[in-house]
Image (cartoon, rainbow, N blue to C red):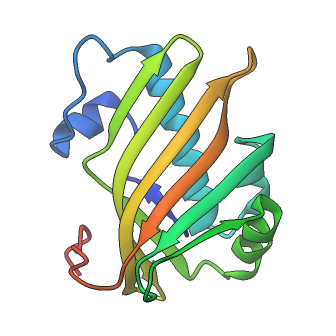
Amino acid sequence: IMGGRIFGVTLLTLTTLGVLVPAHLAGQDQDDALEAVDRIFEGMRTADPAMVRAVFAADARFAMVDARRSPPAVAVQSVQGWLDAIGESDGSWDERIYDVQARVDGNMASVWAPYTFYLNGAISHCGINSIELLHDGQGWKVTQISDTRRSEDCPDPLGS
């Protein structure tokens, strides 16, 4: 995952964008989980690592499969290393997710979202984000983000 923002993470906005939110899942818990995800992308877009860090559990993981390499490479990156990179990005990262699917069961949520990552306004790569969250009584905390990365056939949700 790199820089960006969910396209307005309210149920109304998600519906406007054509994101299908099952009626039995629509509710405050789901909205709150999606707002936590939104803070990640807003913090990335604005190069604010503190905003992003506030959403993560202390022992969270960040993993990826990079299909831009042959063979595809699986890597685990420290959350702190990623946060440091966000702080150094100078607002050049803009990751846009779309077709968001969220599932919530009590204190557990899972968000699946295709994304396109823009670097300095140009498409850099795209893939899928899988974000796992747990509610700790104080709010939703990300326990793991996994993503895929490819540089071919990337959609342009911004229509640039």
The answer to whether residue 84 is left or right of residue 74 is right
Quarter of the figure with residue 158: bottom left
Q: Position of residue 30 (x, y in %)?
A: 44, 23
Left or right, 104 with reference to 76:
left
In the rendered image, residue 156, in percent from the top left (x then y), is placed at 23, 74
Residue 36 visible in rendering: yes
Q: Is residue 65 left or right of residue 158?
A: right
Q: Residue at x 61, y 60 (%)?
A: 63
Q: Quadrant of residue 84?
A: bottom right
Position in image of residue 114 (x %, y %): 32, 57
Q: Quadrant of the N terminus?
A: bottom right
| Above or below 145: residue 150 | below
Q: Against 90, is 109 above or below?
A: above
Residue at image point 44% right, 55% down: 129
Residue 21, compared with residue 3, is above or below; it is above
> Can residue 8 be seen?
no
- Residue at the outermost front position: 71
Which corner quadrant holds the C terminus? bottom left
The residue located at (78%, 63%) in the rendering is 78
Q: Nearer the viewer, residue 97 or 51?
A: 97
User: Residue 76: x and y, percent?
Assistant: 68, 65
